[in-house]
Image (tube, rainbow, N blue to C red):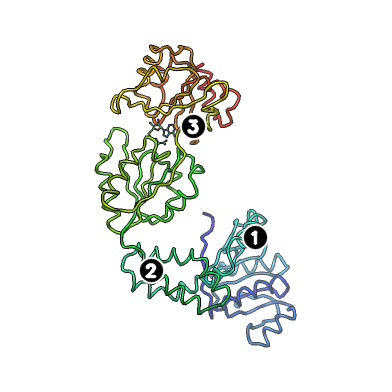
Amino acid sequence: MDYLPIFCQLQQKACLLVGGGEVAERKARLLLDAGARLTVNALQFTPQFHIWAELGQVTLVAGEFSADLLAEKWLAIAATDSVEVNALVYQFANQQRVFCNVVDDPKRASFIMPSIIDRSPIMVAVSSGGKAPVLARLLREKLEAVLPQHLGQLAQLAGSLRQRVKQQFANIGARRRFWEKLFAHDRLAQSLANADSVLADQQVEQLFADRPEEQGEVVLVGAGPGDAGLLTLKGLQQIQQADVVVYDRLVSDEVMALVRRDAERIFVGKRAGYHCVPQEQINQILLAQARRGLRVVRLKGGDPFIFGRGGEELETLAEADIPFSVVPGITAASGCSAYSGIPLTHRDHAQSVRLVTGHAKADGGLDWAQLAAQQQTLVFYMGLTQAAEIQKQLMAYGMAASMPIALVENGTSTRQRVIEGKLEQLGALAAQAASPSLIIVGSVVNLRSKLNWFASGEGSAERSKMA
Ligand code: SAH
């Protein structure tokens, strides 16, 4: 961070502006808007400065700049058309520890002025630290377009309701839900925009009347396989509204970075060498958090209903009458397929695809005869440790030893690695792969040579080595 963005309270604070031209006039306007007590020093002033002076809004000091003008000032802006004078102002301001901005010279300034979007009391400031002012301006225009004009009125209203909300809702979660409802209330926003205070008051009273349920709720959200861009919009909204997020190892750091900052995070996954929190305990954690009246997000890698035990967690909640909902995610098979350039179905290769658990022993036996059948693609989840067994069984049931296979490790992330080979090598190749990895079996794997768009250098090297 090159600069610390801050919002200065300048009401009645003495500030110095050096320069009396049009650029200085724009800076003066901003300082006056912020309520500063402004002294302007220049050789000459535009007519506007004289008008302000007559109205008593600024004090004009005609003549050369001198350092004593900086005495008792909170901040200074140098906006003359002379580089030397500006440099002088900056130099003296620095000596006297007065923050100083030099127009069009961010390098010689102890503060810079951002582009602002003013929806007072909501203020958005955009800066590129002087490196790309045009980009900052474009961003400002975008934000201007996106932020509705009535935002300021809404924030004003919120300010006037704060005390009452605090009194009415003891619980922080309930307060936040009230605010979320208020800020998402389109009709209320319209009433404010129409300056219809009677209707706006009614709508606010209504919001207070239908009190948010005391009971918490649980939202089961699929985080996708890794790349945060694969999170759904609904998933994003949920993790940004959560009080508590219960997550495990498969949820990427990138996705976790999108979670609401002050949400509590509870890790229930397995770390290398350590046991994971038993399923029953996770169920109890969800229950206990929801019973505190909180909005709980249970965040899971991929899709929660595909080898995610999402169903088991929800059953516990259903029995306890805790409201819940589910947001699907992109499952590892879809993510790894897309990011490795291996379509799971193809008219010439596979008319169906099977998502299979590699933990077959624990989860009941697999029908190997069906799995070894032609014209389909097999995707094994949790298959690394069983890879040799998978190889053996598929070959025993007649699948060709030369059937193409791929292992996709850390699929969709920047660390994705794809190892290609033949069925007869599966066990050996799996021994070189790290978790999480997905095993894809089928002739669709051959399409990767044409369709691979996400290859990292490492992946391709690996591929040629293994081929
Ligand atoms: N619910 C998850 C799957 C959980 S089971 C989903 O829908 O994707 C865990 C298995 O998923 C892992 O053993 C691995 O086989 C697979 N997996 C999950 N994320 C993966 C990734 N980014 N790359 C490769 N495989 C992944």
Nearer to the camera, 305 or 98:
305
Residue 245, x across and y down, in percent = 36, 50
Asked whether the viewer can see residue 93, the reply is yes
Residue 62, x across and y down, in percent = 70, 81
Mark 1 highlights which residue? 141
- Amino acid carrying label 1: it is Glu
Q: Who comes first in sequence, dot 2 or dot 3?
A: 2
Dot 2 falls on a residue whose secondary structure is loop
User: Which numbered disc covers residue 284?
Assistant: none
Mark 2 highlights which residue? 210
Nearer to the camera, 150 or 21:
150
The residues bearing labels 1 and 3 have C-alpha atoms spaced at a distance of: 38 Å
Q: Are marks 2 and 1 in contact (CB under 8 Å)?
A: no
* Residue depicted at 62% across the width and 63% down the height: 144
Which of pointers 1 and 3 indicates the residue nearer the eye?
3
Mark 3 highlights which residue? 336
Q: Is mark 3 within 8 Å of ligand 1?
A: yes
Classify residue 109 by image quadrant.
bottom right
- Amino acid carrying label 3: it is Cys
Residue 152, x across and y down, in percent = 54, 71
* Residue depicted at 67% across the width and 67% down the height: 86
Q: Who comes first in sequence, dot 2 or dot 1?
A: 1
Nearer to the camera, 186 or 285:
186
Dot 1 falls on a residue whose secondary structure is helix
Which of pointers 2 and 1 indicates the residue nearer the eye?
2
Say few, some or many: other residues with alpha carbon within 10 Å of mark 1 (under 14 / 14 to 19 / 20 or more).
some
- Amino acid carrying label 2: it is Asp
Ligand 1 quadrant? top left
Residue 260, x across and y down, in percent = 42, 54
